[in-house]
Image: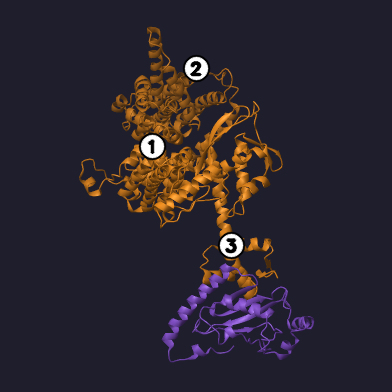
Chain colours: A purple, B orange
Amino acid sequence: MTTNPAAGKPSNQTKSATETASVAKRLQNELMTLMMSGTPGISAFPDGDDLMNWTATISGPEGTVYENLKYKLAMKFPTSYPYNAPTVTFKTPIYHPNVDMNGNICLDILKDKWSAVYTVQTILVSLQSLLGEPNNNSPLNDEAAEMWGNPEQFRKQVLAAHPGNDE
Amino acid sequence: MTQHPRKRQKTDTDMDWDRAVEVTEVPVGVTPPIYPHDLQATAPESVGENLFDFITTELISIFLKAIAMELLGSQGAPGLDDDWCWDRYSHLVGELSGLLNHYAFGSALLMLGTLFEEQSRSFFEGAVRTMLPPCFAEVTQRVLDYSLEKSSKFGSDSDSQQARASHMAEVRVLVENLKNIGLYEEARTAILATAKKTIKERVEECRGEYEERHLNDCLEWVTCRVSDNWLSAIDTTSEVDASHRQAIPTFDWSHVLRMSTYQGFCSMRISEMFDLIRDAIDTLPAPALLDLKDCLKTSVQKDELVESLKEVLEARILHAGVATEDIVSLFIATENCLRLLDPSSNLLLRTIEPMKQYLRRRPDTVKHILTRMLDQNSELAEAMREPDNCVDDEDFDDSADWNPEPIDAVGSREERNVDIITRLISVFENKEVFVNEFHKILLESLLHKTGYDTEQETMELELLKIRFGEASFHQCEVMLLDMAVSRRLHKHIREGSLAASRAIELEPEEDMFHVTTISHLFWPTINTCEFRIPFTNISSAQAAYAKQFQEQKPNRKLKWKPNAGLVEVELEMGDGRCKTYTVTELQAAVIYHFGAESRNGTSSIGDIVEDLRSQGSASDFEEDIRDCVQLWIGHSVLKEVSLDCWEVVETLDSDASGSGGSTSIIHGARKSEEERARAKEEAEMRAKFQPMIVALLTNQGAQNAEKIQSILAMFFQFSHPMADLQKMLDHMVAEGMLALAMNGKYSVRM
């Protein structure tokens, strides 16, 4: 559990309270939209009654080495959301060029390319496509980046890293 | 000391008597009569205590005879007719009386004092009373019944009158004798019982007779037959009173009989109150009710009425087997009847509550009440036309016909004074349910109109406004306004198309095509069913109308509501049958499908669905089609030739005849639609919450139903009861989306 830097600032507490309310509203709407859209292969839901922390699940796209595998992610929303990107990490260990062993993700839209128009849904769709099309130019996992050209071996590594679909 | 042996003696005699009863049957006829002369002959020799003992023994012996007779009589032994009983009884009582006279006289002679005569009479009476058999009252009553019956049978000719006089003399002697031996009380009780029995029989004759008033007839009959004809002849209380040594309280026979008549009549009518109310559905049995009102004087009787009516209503109408319509009818009838009985409505309020409670539970009560209110031929029509003119309390207090509150008053005076309409409305807590229901009724009637005439609906709305207030019907007013606008628009567009010189093409269609443009926000949800309209002329007319509409109202969007309207279909069959049906659009489309030449009058479910399905058709479209086919089968237009394959019945068998009018068609169709609407609602709820449940369980792991409910409530305002959620979860488990673990937790199937 890492501390949220925005929430930790004691100076503007009242401001953050109103912010939290508006963030909650935005997240509530996003949750509703996500449910209604029913995009296949992605889903997310808040942890308990805490709207600022979600758990998401994405399935590996068909035709990729991640086919038939499910990955869980943790999404942590800052109080400045949607002006700042949420912190997204893989909870399920994954063998992927742009994901390190701790689950940290290297994806431009989650870093410098973040925009307030992105939503949980777009993030998850982007991550899903990242599985099939890794950015091998800026790898976090060099070994995986190198192995990408060899799908059979890569698939073995992926399966070895994945704990299986059993909860 | 003297008390003790007396007491013992008494017990002894009682026992003797008991034993005697068992053995006396045989010796009745042969027991030699004991004459007072015998008694007199022996009496002087044993004065004092002995005499008493002796007399007591004699008394027992005489009474045994009476008892024996009674026993034989009550067992209904053959050959023992009432006549004989009467003679025997009169004779025995006569003997007893004579015995007393002689005894008293003898004692007086012996003791030379009238004072002693008094004492001996007292002793005698005491002895008689002590040994009075328990069945004495019964025997006496039986004998008197006989006498009363006999007295009423005499004709008017001189012989009969003479016979009557002699019989009445006998009766008088008997009663005198009974009085003499101190059994006046018993005699009176028996006389009263006889009179009551006769009254009851007379009153029973009026059962089921509601057309005329019978109470006064009964009273007159009782006065004439019982009081004047019989009772006056035998009871001479007033004369005796003066001379008799005991002050007997005056007994007003005519008053007592009057009261008994009232009471008997009242009980009889109360017992048939339910029948009265049932009759009141058609016409109020006012004469019978007014009779009852005159009788219903005591609160005990009112309680009896309330309790018995509540009981019978509960047992006969407040259960699932009775149609709501009938319960409402009875509700109104009960109100009318009890209102007549008790203008203060106190009885009504005490009775009607269970009915109200029960009606509240029925889902279609509102509809029935409202339909009845609006029905110009119903009993409520008149009451609907005027507002509830509930009497103002203060004015009422000042008026001359002020009455105190009933002692058992229920509710406030205002509550009791409301009229039938307000009472019906009061079945429900709020008036809103009626407004909503009218909204729906209005929808039906407006949609089923082949024209734009809303005079009837406007009038109904005005009627309801009187009761429910102007403000409640805002939406309904918009609906009526929409109709007027539609009429104008229709006219306008038709004129427009005429002007566009397309008149020849469109004119014949104008008659068969009416459009109602509705402001959908103000109308209840209309059940629609998307399908392809097979009539090309209709769809082209629709398109033409839409185009014109767009020109007329450029800033409005026209959206068709398929299957909301009605179609008049004329079918001509192979055998020359020609019939017109008013059906829903889809029903018309289905039969049109069969009429298409290429089909040769036969089609299967798949063909129909394929032919009529459009993009927006619901998933249960096939079900809709099946319903439509069923309707036509019901009208002997179609028949099933093989599974899910139907054929047009061109030639009707003589024995199979078409049934049902066009009204029942729509009714049946609507009903199944209602059911489907409920299923649809459930499906909608599932469609809405299913992805949320799946998302929740996917990401947060297995949860039990309670947790799921609380989370759904927190994030998605899920307000359905637990049962609904449980049903939904069960459904999802059945469909294989979820798995239910042993610990009651649901999880997503991977």
C-alpha separation, residue under disc 3 versus residue under disc 2: 90 Å
Q: Is residue A114 above or below residue B572?
A: below
* Residue that numbered label 3 is attached to: B687
The three-letter amino acid code for the residue at tag 1 is Gln
User: What number is the disc on residue B83?
Assistant: 2
Seen in the image, is B407 located left or right of residue B305? left
Label 1 vs label 3, nearer the camera: 3
The three-letter amino acid code for the residue at tag 3 is Ala
Sequence order check: which comes first, mark 1 or mark 3?
Answer: 1
In this orientation, which residue lies closer to the viewer: B163 or B622? B622
Mark 3 belongs to which subunit? B
> SS class of the residue under badge 2?
helix
> SS class of the residue under badge 1?
loop
* Residue that numbered label 1 is attached to: B376
Q: Residue at x 52, y 72 (%)?
A: B714
> Residue B617, image x and y in percent?
59, 53
